[in-house]
Image: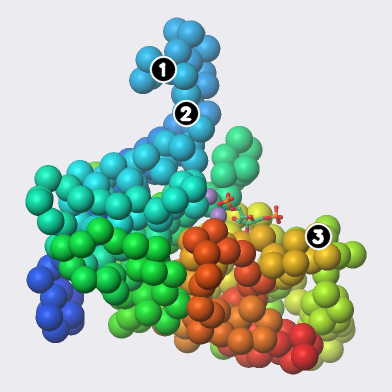
């Protein structure tokens, strides 16, 4: 990585004028997520080490029982966004209800709400496999200065103002979009700075990777079973290769760079699939579309769905446009 690359901070300042009526609020919000992401990154990186230190002294480095990383990440994001009084509300996969932020100001006149999956793929932590964070930003629809309500959070994904993810992988990357394409930044851990490493990411129109938990095959709808057989057929550029980590963020990130399709369908056990519309599917769909890809529930665009509840689940087909088109054909 060369020193000429823009840092994330420089990039945010440089692009601030893109938001015509911006007061810098969204920029400050992205900055807060950048900071919280670094805090979580630090904790994730020493996940194995904390155990070792804890065994020696009987407690971990914080002098308390090691918190599950989901809880830690959830608190890190909520605290950062709350302390900086940068949003008027937060909804998290880890919280039953949304959080109203009043701040010290008499009336919180911030206009944005954030929805977050603080730690995605957390079952992979114990085995040192990549995990991530996913976030989604909307402009509130209720009047400024009042307390946010559920309807501020239940907006269709096509109303997102920004969305992004952090992948805690072999390197840590923050990838986000404010509706003008997608850019990726890689963390230099030595100095704690993100550098623009992947400007203007575009998903290849077509790839040769399909990502799905095939262990559930027997429970899949017929369309998905048929699509899998199509992927495995010997013809032209097929069979495709199968890659599935079990952490949505790095699975999605890989497909975005290399071209591929990620599927978490409805199953006979989970009629709405597993992934959450508001914390996982909408932000990933926004990024996919901003990068020229596509996201669907098998029948219609994810971003056009009107959410009815905070923790709603939805079947998810996402990635290279032509591959999602093909999967939809099989679902008919
Ligand atoms: P989370 O850790 O936030 O609960 O999300 C886990 C999700 C997602 O990251 C992943 O793609 C999927 O669960 C894997 O599910 P299966 O183990 O059923 O394949
Ligand atoms: Mn998740
Ligand atoms: Mn999670």
Q: Label 2, on which residue? A: 67
**Marks 1 and 3, how far apart in space?**
39 Å
Q: How far across and how far down the image is residue 186, in percent? A: 35, 58
- Mark 3 or 2, nearer chain start: 2
Number of the front mark, 3 or 2: 3
- Are the residues flagged by discs 2 and 1 in contact, CB closer than 8 Å? yes
Tell me: 209 left or right of 114: right
> Against 208, is 276 above or below?
above
> Against 109, is 39 above or below?
above
Number of the front mark, 1 or 3: 3
Q: Quadrant of residue 83?
A: top left
Foreground pick, 161 / 236? 161
Q: Quadrant of residue 16?
A: bottom left
Task: Please tell me the numbered disc located at residue 98.
Answer: none
**Marks 3 and 2, how far apart in space?**
31 Å
Q: Label 1, on which residue? A: 64
Residue drawn at point x = 36 percent, y = 20 percent: 62
Q: Quadrant of residue 177?
A: bottom left
Q: Label 3, on which residue? A: 269
Residue drawn at point x = 24 percent, y = 47 percent: 82
Q: How far across and how far down the image is residue 34, in percent? A: 28, 54
Residue drawn at point x = 26 percent, y = 66 percent: 112
Q: Residue furthest right?
A: 218
């Amino acid at each position: 990585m060369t020193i000429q690359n823009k840092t994330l901070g420089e990039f945010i300042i440089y692009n601030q004028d893109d938001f015509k009526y911006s007061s810098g609020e969204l920029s400050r919000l992205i900055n807060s997520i950048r900071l919280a992401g670094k805090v979580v990154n630090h904790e994730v990186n020493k996940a194995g080490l904390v155990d070792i230190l804890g065994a020696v002294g009987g407690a971990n480095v914080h002098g308390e029982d090691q918190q599950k990383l989901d809880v830690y990440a959830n608190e890190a994001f909520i605290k950062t966004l709350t302390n900086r009084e940068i949003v008027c509300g937060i909804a998290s996969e880890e919280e039953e209800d949304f959080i109203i932020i009043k701040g010290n100001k008499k009336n919180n006149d911030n206009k944005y709400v954030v929805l977050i999956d603080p730690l995605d793929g957390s079952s992979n932590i114990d085995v040192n496999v990549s995990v991530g964070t996913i976030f989604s930003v909307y402009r509130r629809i209720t009047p400024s200065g009042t307390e946010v309500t559920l309807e501020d959070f239940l907006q269709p994904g096509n109303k997102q103002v920004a969305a992004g993810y952090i992948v805690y992988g072999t390197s840590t990357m923050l990838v986000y979009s404010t509706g003008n394409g997608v850019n990726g930044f890689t963390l230099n851990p030595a100095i704690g700075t993100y550098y623009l490493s992947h400007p203007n990411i575009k998903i290849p129109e077509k790839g040769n990777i399909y990502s799905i938990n095939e262990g559930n095959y027997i429970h899949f709808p017929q369309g998905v079973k048929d699509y899998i057989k199509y992927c495995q057929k010997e013809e032209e550029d097929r069979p495709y290769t199968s890659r599935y980590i079990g952490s949505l963020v790095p699975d999605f990130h890989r497909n975005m760079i290399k071209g591929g399709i990620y599927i978490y369908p409805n199953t006979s056990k989970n009629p709405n699939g597993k992934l959450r519309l508001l914390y996982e599917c909408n932000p990933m769909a926004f990024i996919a579309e901003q990068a020229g890809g596509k996201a669907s529930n098998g029948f219609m665009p994810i971003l056009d769905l009107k959410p009815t509840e905070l923790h709603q689940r939805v079947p998810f087909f996402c990635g290279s446009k032509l591959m999602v088109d093909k999967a939809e054909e099989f679902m008919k």
